[in-house]
Amino acid sequence: MNTPARGSLLGIEHLQQDEALRLLKLARRMNPQKPRSLLRNRKIILLFYEPSTRTRSSFEIAAKSLGAITTLVQSSGSSIEKGESLLDTGYTLRAVGADAIVIRHPSAGAPHLMAKYLDIPVINAGDGMHEHPSQALLDAFTILKHKKSLKGLQVAIIGDIVHSRVARSACHLLTRFGAKITLCGPPEFVPEVATTLASGLRISRHLEEAVRGADVVMLLRVQKERLAGQKISLQDYIAHYQMNAARLKLAKRDAIVMHPGPIIRGLELTSEVADSPQSVIVDEVRSGVPVRMAILARALGRAK
Ligand code: CP
């Protein structure tokens, strides 16, 4: 059992601020339109135990834009279905020549466990309700395309916070850079304990209060797959927390609307908001490629 290999990215909570800054600066220099051979012939395994569109495809495109070879292993159709353990799967992938593993898993801590036992970098592409570090970095990268600085920004994060690894990583990263975050939603989605996620977090039960004067409005999907029998009235949720054009008007005129995706139109937001000029949702997806290029280059020691 070891400390994680250099270049692993397991979460934002323990990532040094200067490391996060270095990644954001490196991402600015990455151009997916101009492929580079920084990672030529390095083998990157994309190990996905949960569904993904954005994270998986952007890690793959990022890796290939740097000349790496990628292999996708999903729980469905692999020996995971036959009962192979997480670590045995890791040892197998290492044995076939993996230089790095990008892993998404429904259990919090799965990437950390793998990183303790493997001598190659492990990158967390989302572990249960814990962290989604590459999403937080691409969100910060996207915000910085539209705002001068994160310091002092008023950020409203609205929705299913308790089940959201995106919210957890975003809170760690954005507060570290001086953003002021208000978490908004009903108690089932935003319990009082959520303020302990990071320092200086505020909770509001009223969407109008959370959005008023915000620079950034981040919406989250209701994660029905993680509700485990909890009865939530979606009609009530829509009535009180759906972002629509009238509610968005309470934010600053130049506020941006973010959502990590997938978006559910008609639930956490209306199509009018999703497609409005203030929406940077597609830009977030686009930012995923250079940010993940930077993460992979750092992982394999080519962060130049
Ligand atoms: N934001 C995000 O993780 O999206 P995917 O589940 O499609 O990867």
Image (spheres, grey):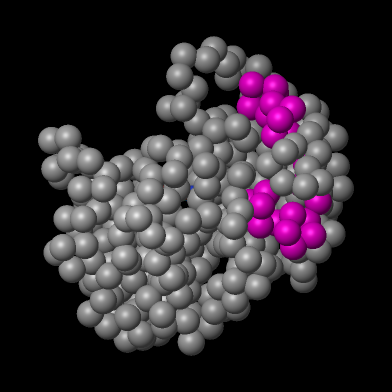
In this rendering, position of residue 243 left or right of residue 82: right
Judging depth in this view, the residue of 277 and 203 nearest the camera is 203
- The residue positioned 48% from the left and 56% from the top of the image is 10
Residue 179, percent across and down? 78, 56
The magenta-colored residue range is 170-194
Judging depth in this view, the residue of 190 and 99 nearest the camera is 99
Q: Say if residue 169 shows up in the picture.
A: yes
Residue 83, percent across and down? 17, 35
Residue 223, percent across and down? 50, 31
- The residue positioned 80% from the left and 28% from the top of the image is 206
Residue 129, percent across and down? 51, 37
Q: Say if residue 276 shows up in the picture.
A: no
- The residue positioned 31% from the left and 65% from the top of the image is 119
Q: Is residue 150 above or below residue 267?
A: below
Q: Is residue 210 above or below residue 235?
A: below
Q: Quadrant of the N terminus?
A: bottom left
Q: Is residue 251 above or below residue 184?
A: below
- Callout count: 0
- Which image quadrant is residue 168 in? top right
In this rendering, position of residue 63 left or right of residue 184: left
- The residue positioned 53% from the left and 75% from the top of the image is 27
Q: Is residue 114 above or below residue 49?
A: below
Residue 239 colored in magenta in the image: no
Residue 181 colored in magenta in the image: yes
- Which image quadrant is residue 76 in? top left
